[in-house]
Image: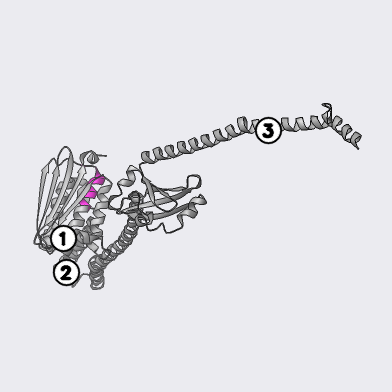
């Protein structure tokens, strides 16, 4: 028994024993692993953490810089919905400007969704909001790795106004098109009525008299009858001239705008009993034909409104032609009107004024209406002189 123990101890104390090699190898590997973790892996991990934090800090600084440079409002909130930062543009939101430390949903009621969930999921939310009379498209974007959210504002006020104006213009265009169709139909009916009641009746009378001459073989046809027949023919010719003149004033091409307006003024005064006057200042040089016709039609439109709506006793036309502009001023002493009412679809005079505006817009002109209830009306048209050059 003692011999066995001695033999076991001898084998254990022998340095060449494989157990020693295994133990030494295990200890060596353990030390190397420890040293690797301590001097290689742990420092690398620590360095990575530091670099990650520095990168996050850099990103935050860059985001803050971009936020300050952004011309649009930008607000940053934490997961509790508390405002933690605003840029300069956000400070200019007026009475609704956010304050650091406030709840964001007090400023923007539309943010009624769980903010922390949006942040955790990096979830963007887009909506619109009207703030201090401005219309914004708002992007709420959660940033999970920073545990914050940023709220980006895009001011769409001008775009919305443009869209509303465009829609309003489309409505006005439809109404104007309808009015023009009705006006054209009324004009056709007027011409048909004038041809029927005037020229048509005269021609019918002439036909009957000629038939009488044929049947009587001129035996009972006196000089008075011939005079009546001649007068009927003359009347028909004059009525046809009047109809043609209203469609296209022949005098305008031949004698120009100033003399044609004088003739128009006298004719309106004679037909309606409204006292009319016209004053022309500066040069009466010929303008291009299209512009002369436009100014003539504009005057016709204005005088038509005076006759139909103003209950005026007098009207005046002034034409001023200088080196820079040509100005047409038409005034009356009638009952006047509220220019704002001309936007009403039911207001026929409004369409007349709209027609005027459409006419002069071709020449980059301006139309100004000065009127109020009981104080008459003044319509001023100004067209740049460069638009008046002869064609």
Q: State the image coordinates of residue 256 (x, y, percent, origin top left).
A: 18, 45
Q: Residue 33 carries which label?
A: 3
Could you tell me which residue is drawn at 89 percent across and 32 percent down? Answer: 7
Give the residue pinned by disc 1. 306
Q: State the image coordinates of residue 30 (x, y, percent, origin top left).
A: 70, 33
Q: Nearer the viewer, residue 146 or 94?
A: 146
Q: State the image coordinates of residue 48 (x, y, percent, origin top left).
A: 55, 35
Q: Residues within 10 Å of mark 2 (few under 14, many from 20)?
A: few
Give the residue pinned by disc 2. 225
Left or right: where 73 falls relative to 46? left
- 344 w.r.t. 6: above or below: below
Q: State the image coordinates of residue 39 (x, y, percent, origin top left).
A: 61, 30
Q: Which of 250 and 279 is in front in this view?
A: 279
Say if residue 77 shows up in the picture.
yes
Whether residues under marks 2 and 1 lie with C-beta atoms below 8 angstroms apart, the answer is no
- Disc 2 secondary structure class: helix
Could you tell me which residue is drawn at 32 percent across and 50 percent down? Answer: 99
Magenta stretch prevailing secondary structure: helix
Left or right: where 164 falls relative to 296? right
| Residue at the extreme front | 2
Q: Residues within 10 Å of mark 1 (few under 14, many from 20)?
A: many
Say if residue 247 shows up in the picture.
no
């Amino acid at each position: 028994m003692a011999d066995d123990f001695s033999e076991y101890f001898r084998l254990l104390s022998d340095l060449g024993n494989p157990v020693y090699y295994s133990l030494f190898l295990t200890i060596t590997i353990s030390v190397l692993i420890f040293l690797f973790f301590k001097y290689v892996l742990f420092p690398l991990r620590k360095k990575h953490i530091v670099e990650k934090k520095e990168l996050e800090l850099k990103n935050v600084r860059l985001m803050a810089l971009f936020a300050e440079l952004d011309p649009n409002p930008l607000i940053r909130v934490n997961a509790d919905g508390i405002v933690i930062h605003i840029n300069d543009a956000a400070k200019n939101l007026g009475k609704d400007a956010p304050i650091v430390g406030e709840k964001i949903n007090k400023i923007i009621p539309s943010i009624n969704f769980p903010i922390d969930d949006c942040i955790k999921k990096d979830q963007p939310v887009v909506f619109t909001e009207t703030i201090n009379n401005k219309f914004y498209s708002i992007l709420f974007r959660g940033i999970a790795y920073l545990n914050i959210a940023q709220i980006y504002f895009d001011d769409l006020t001008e775009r919305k106004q443009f869209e509303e104006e465009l829609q309003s213009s489309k409505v006005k265009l439809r109404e104007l098109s309808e009015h023009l169709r009705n006006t054209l139909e009324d004009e056709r009916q007027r011409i048909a009525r004038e041809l029927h009641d005037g020229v048509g009746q005269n021609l019918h009378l002439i036909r009957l008299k000629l038939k009488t001459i044929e049947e009587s073989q001129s035996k009972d046809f006196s000089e008075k009858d011939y005079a009546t027949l001649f007068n009927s023919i003359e009347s028909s010719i004059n009525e046809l001239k009047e109809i043609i003149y209203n469609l296209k004033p022949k005098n305008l091409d031949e004698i120009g705008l100033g003399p044609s307006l004088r003739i128009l003024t006298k004719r309106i005064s004679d037909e309606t009993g409204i006292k009319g006057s016209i004053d022309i200042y500066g040069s009466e040089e010929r303008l291009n034909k299209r512009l002369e016709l436009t100014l003539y039609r504009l005057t016709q439109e204005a005088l038509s409104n005076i006759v139909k709506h103003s209950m005026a006793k007098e009207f005046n036309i002034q034409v001023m032609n200088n080196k820079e502009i040509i100005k047409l001023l038409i005034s009356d002493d009638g009952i006047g009107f509220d220019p704002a009412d001309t936007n009403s679809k039911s207001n026929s005079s409004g369409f007349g004024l709209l027609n005027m505006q459409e006419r002069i817009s071709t020449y980059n002109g301006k139309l100004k209406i000065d009127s109020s209830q009981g104080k008459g009306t003044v319509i001023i048209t100004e067209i740049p002189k460069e638009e008046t050059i002869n064609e």
